[in-house]
């Protein structure tokens, strides 16, 4: 007689994989459940997985999944050991969903966006050279982080500023090439339609754009196109006297003539090849006469080839960090020139900084007293996805007086989350919509100019020989006003000189940094060529 054999499999405490005679291996923890010994076995993930990378995605595979959204190391940690530790953890939290002809992973729009999730993923697990991958046996269903047809609300405001890297918008057909921007008319037509759809959707009063072809053909084309898609003649651009057509790019301002008027001429404050990539312009709001200065910057990209201080030090900031720091410092050093020239203390610093939030260039800004509006209003968000990790390469920062008037700042996720096959370079899934019109997400900043009174409107200022101080020292800056300020000194009550600076253009305003000041009383002296005007300052 045959004997019956009963096999009992015990459950071992502490293991994240439960074995059953007739079921798949359950993976309950990403970090402890994935083991090389599972190579070739059927598994099921009992927790949601997040799509973190789709750059090489077809509609049916090569997708990176992680337990949650992965952040670029220097977005959340200081460069060096901390950032490198996060980079290592990020690599340990990746699973490749392999290409298969059995299933289509995308939705009805043929997209699969980073940030979407899948629950109950089942398939055959593989392990090779430190990388885990899975071929599904049941079609995965993704949901979450769907496309939005319009940007997020930026509060009750009377002015909206969109800052946006439009990724090599070159309209001059004589300059089309296979390296930068469109290759031919067909590609440019697709690029143009998508960029214009994005600009229309942003519905901004002022557009501060990066990576527009040098000369005036490209910016003119953008303005004409924006007027076309809005069935208006409302938009114009700020002239910068640049007529030399080139595949090199520059920053430009496009504005709604019914809402704002440029005040004085544009300021080009970059140096060398970056002369047109650090620019500023003031605008007066027609509804109430309030003024805003916008400085748009496109700092040097990360990359290889740097030497000396620009070599990649391995701290997570990439190559050319020293140059980016120098360019950021140039912005800070130029603030008083801008406030004097345009006679207003409200400055918004925006653009593609090619640096994440914890990197040195951004610290230059915030240490000088500029207030990071994206970290204030949307701290967990991002504008760029690289190697499966998200972060802010694009920023919006404000001087202390303007920060009080900012109502919101948020990215519009039309690009970073989308697969690259929606680029204008490809025709298969092309649609004349804003999605994947560029590789960066645009940033929209809302401002309610005039709702926070700084007391420095010309009609309200006491014109007698007095030194007026406005603002909150805890915000990093105070604003000085007098009929004329040539030079400023800050002294302790015992007479020790703490700060001294010449005021560019001998203007009426001066931004005095207060970040490093200790608590106590100080004397502020402003020289006007005839006398020294003195006022007290208390740091609490």
Image: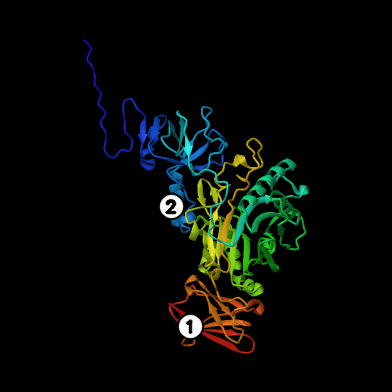
Q: Nearer the viewer, mark 2 or mark 1?
A: 1
Does the residue at mark 2 contact the one at mark 1 (Cβ under 8 Å)? no
Residue 364 visible somewhere in the drawing: no
**Residue drawn at x 54%, y 33% as measured from the top left:** 60
Judging depth in this view, the residue of 159 and 83 nearest the camera is 159
Judging depth in this view, the residue of 137 and 235 nearest the camera is 235
Q: Position of residue 221 (x, y in %)?
A: 74, 52
Q: Element at badge 2?
A: helix
Point out the image quarter for the N terminus.
top left
Q: Is residue 522 above or below residue 67?
A: below
Q: Which mark is residue 522?
A: 1
Q: Position of residue 389 (x, y in %)?
A: 50, 48
**Residue position for label 2:** 85
All told, the count of numbered labels is: 2
Q: CA distance from mark 2 to mark 1?
A: 43 Å
Relative to 278, 242 lies left or right: right
**Residue drawn at x 42%, y 37% as measured from the top left:** 119
């Amino acid at each position: 007689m045959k004997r019956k054999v009963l096999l009992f499999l015990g459950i071992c405490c502490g293991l994240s994989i439960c074995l059953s005679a007739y079921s798949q291996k359950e993976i309950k923890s990403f970090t402890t459940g994935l083991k090389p010994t599972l190579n070739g076995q059927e598994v099921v993930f009992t927790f949601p997985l997040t799509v973190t990378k789709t750059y090489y995605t077809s509609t049916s595979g090569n997708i990176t999944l992680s337990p949650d959204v992965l952040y670029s190391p220097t977005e959340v940690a200081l460069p060096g050991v901390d950032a490198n530790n996060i980079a290592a953890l990020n690599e340990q939290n990746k699973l490749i969903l392999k290409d298969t002809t059995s299933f289509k992973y995308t939705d009805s729009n043929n997209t699969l966006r980073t940030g979407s999730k899948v629950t109950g993923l089942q398939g055959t697990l593989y392990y090779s050279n430190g990388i885990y991958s899975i071929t599904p046996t049941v079609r995965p269903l993704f949901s979450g982080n769907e496309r939005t047809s319009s940007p997020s609300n930026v509060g009750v405001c009377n002015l909206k500023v969109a800052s946006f890297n439009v990724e090599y918008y070159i309209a001059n057909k004589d300059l089309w090439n296979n390296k930068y921007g469109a290759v031919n008319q067909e590609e440019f037509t697709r690029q143009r339609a998508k960029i214009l759809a994005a600009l229309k959707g942003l519905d901004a009063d002022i557009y501060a754009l990066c990576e527009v072809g040098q000369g005036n053909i490209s910016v003119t084309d953008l303005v004409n196109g924006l007027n076309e898609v809005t069935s208006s003649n409302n938009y114009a651009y700020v002239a910068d006297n640049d007529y030399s057509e080139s595949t090199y790019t520059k920053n430009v301002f496009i504005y709604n003539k019914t809402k704002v008027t440029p005040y004085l001429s544009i300021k080009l404050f970059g140096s060398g090849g970056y002369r047109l990539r650090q620019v500023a312009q003031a605008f007066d709001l027609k509804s109430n006469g309030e003024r805003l200065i916008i400085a748009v910057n496109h700092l040097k990209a990360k990359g290889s080839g740097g030497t000396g201080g620009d070599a990649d030090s391995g701290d997570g900031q990439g190559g050319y960090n020293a140059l980016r720091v120098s360019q950021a410092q140039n912005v800070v050093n130029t603030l008083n020139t801008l406030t004097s020239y345009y006679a207003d203390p409200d400055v918004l610093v925006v653009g593609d900084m090619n640096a994440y939030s914890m990197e040195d260039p951004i610290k230059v800004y915030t240490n000088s007293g500029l207030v990071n509006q994206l970290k204030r209003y949307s701290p967990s968000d991002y504008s760029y996805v690289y190697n499966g990790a998200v972060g802010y390469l694009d920023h919006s920062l404000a001087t202390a007086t303007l920060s009080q008037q900012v109502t919101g700042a948020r990215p519009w996720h039309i690009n970073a989350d989308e697969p690259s096959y929606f680029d204008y370079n490809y025709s298969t899934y092309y649609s004349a919509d804003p999605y994947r019109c560029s590789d960066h997400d645009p940033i929209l900043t809302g401002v309610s100019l005039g709702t926070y009174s700084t007391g420095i409107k010309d009609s309200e200022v006491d014109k007698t020989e007095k030194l007026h101080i406005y603002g909150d020292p805890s915000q990093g800056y105070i604003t000085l006003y007098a009929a004329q300020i040539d030079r400023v000194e800050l002294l302790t009550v015992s007479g020790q000189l703490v700060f001294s600076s010449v005021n560019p253009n001998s203007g009426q305003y001066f931004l005095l940094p207060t970040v490093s000041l200790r608590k106590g009383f100080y004397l502020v002296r402003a020289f006007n060529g005839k006398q020294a005007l003195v006022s007290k300052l208390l740091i609490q």
